[in-house]
Every structure is written in structure tokens, then in C-alpha cells.
Image (cartoon, rainbow, N blue to C red):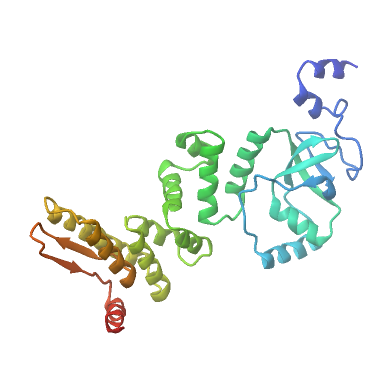
Amino acid sequence: MSIKRNALGKGLSALLENPETDITSKGDIGGSSAIAGAVANIAIEKIEANPFQPRSNFDEQALMELSESIKEQGIIQPVTVRKLGYDKYQLISGERRYKASVMAGLKFIPAFIRIANDQAMLEMALVENIQRENLNAIEIAISYKRLIDECSITQDELCVRVGKNRTTVTNYLRLLKLPPEIQIGIRDNKITMGHARAIINVNDVLTQLKIYNEIISNELSVRRVEEIARTVTDTSKSGDKKNKGKANLTFEYKRIQDKLCSKFETKVEFKRDNKGKGKIVIPFFNDDDLERLLEVFDKK
């Protein structure tokens, strides 16, 4: 009786963590005591998916291989769940292991039980997945952004949560400013994060996409992409200085410039002074790119 009296003054957390007062641990749990703060074998059918799961892509082949491993050796690292009520649980982290266990036909799965409200659960799911799962750079970046936006924490607080310095976190977040096509390329391992960080330094979206396609077509190294990005940036700055004080393009001239950019799939410099005199500059990155431009010129 003394245990129950002591627990009653501590709220729901104390009740759920105490095996004598935990009203949510009734039922079939494979012979283990399903109390918060402990590891128990929980029936898989009583665990629901995590709506806050930051990982959106799972490799089917890798899941099959993990499933076969689980059949042979079992699960080494428990998943993490939260209690929802009478023998009802929601996955916090370990969805890959959970999915593979379902595929393997397991009836029970070892789980570490926690108590969390929705916001705390979201934060735990994001942080634990970032730290423990093999997420790609875009998934990590999205998780960082969600922690800031949905958990209302600052970037400095985020750095503490995930154990990363501010520069690392900033570099991941900047990836989300890239065009969707490039973000997909990062996610699918078509380019590395090093390539992406170099592309980010180029302000023009069309030029970013042009460099991205060059990387894939010609297997450019990160160093080569950094050189290209530096050249493009320096050229742009130089052009801005030369154009200072010159007449702004009219709507009609701007329309022509946009049309040329679209036709040649690269940034086109269109310069015009107050007297109507000007020039068109079409940059190229290498001989192959020059050949491509010449083919465009030859087309009728």
C-alpha cells in the first residue's frame, strides 16, 4: 500500500513507471512487464506507426536483408515506443527495425518504453533518428528544419540537441534552398554534399542546375565544381560592378534575356547602355559545354 500512496502524489509519470500502479500494462506482452522506463517484449500488433517519422525512403532490398538477419539472430537493439493507453503503443524510433520485424513474421518485439506528449515525441523521434539512422543529407536537413519550426527551438538549441557545431547545422539547412531537382539528386546519391555546398554559392538557379547536370554528365570532382562556382561568382560580381550606373533593362529587354537563358540553359548576360548599345555574353564551362552551345546555334 505504501508504494501506491507514494506514487499517487507524483502524477501520471510515476503511476506509469510503477509496476504496481501501471494501469496500461495489462494484457499479453510476452511475459514482460510493460512499464515506462523499461524494456519489454511488446506485441507488434499493439504498436502503431510514428506519424512524426522523419525518414521517408526505405531501401526494400536492405529491409529484406535486415529481415533475414532478424529471423536468424533476433533484434539486438530495441525500438523506442511511447504509451498511448491500455496496451497501446506508438513508435518513436526504430521504424526500419520495426518494418523488418513485421516482414520477418515476428509477433513480439523488444521495445524501450517512454512517456511523451506529441511535441516531445516529435523532438525525440527527430533527434534519435538523426543520431542513430543512416539518413541521407536531405533527410537530416529536413529533420533539422522541423526541429526548429515545429519544436520552436533556436539554431543554437538545435546544435546542443543533435551534438553538432553551428557550421555543420547551417550547411545542412542551406541544402533546402537548392532547387528540388538538386535536392532529389542529393537524396538519391547522384551528387555528394560537397558538390551541393559548392553549388549553393552560385546565386542563379539556372546556373545551379547547369552545374548539377555537368556533375552527373562528366563526373566532376568536388574541387572542380568549387572552381566553376568560384568563376561564376567572380564573373557575376565583376559584371555587377561594370553595370553600376548603366541603364536598367526594360521589360522587353528583360523578356529577351529570359528567353535566351531558357534557350541556352545557362545564365546569359544582357548589357545595354542609355544609347541603346549593348552586348550579349553567353558563358561556357569547358569545351564540351561550348560544343553544346554551338549545337544550339546551329539549330534552325
Left or right, 27 with reference to 121: right
Q: Nearer the viewer, residue 156 or 253?
A: 253
- Snapshot quadrant of residue 6: top right
Q: Residue at x 67, y 35 (%)?
A: 118
Horizontal and vertical percent position of residue 2: 87, 15
Horizontal and vertical percent position of residue 263: 32, 72
Furthest residue in direction front, as rendered: 252
| Rendered view: 297 above or below 246 | below
Quadrant where the N terminus lies? top right
Left or right, 200 with reference to 18: left
| Rendered view: 59 above or below 79 | below
Furthest residue in direction left, as rendered: 275
Instruction: Report the number of numbered marks.
Output: 0
- Snapshot quadrant of residue 74: bottom right
Quadrant where the C terminus lies? bottom left
Q: Nearer the viewer, residue 233 or 207?
A: 207
Q: Nearer the viewer, residue 166 or 151?
A: 151
Horizontal and vertical percent position of residue 255: 28, 62
| Rendered view: 21 above or below 88 | above
Horizontal and vertical percent position of residue 191: 45, 65
Q: Residue at x 53, y 41 (%)?
A: 162
Left or right, 154 with reference to 106: left
Q: Residue at x 13, y 56 (%)?
A: 242
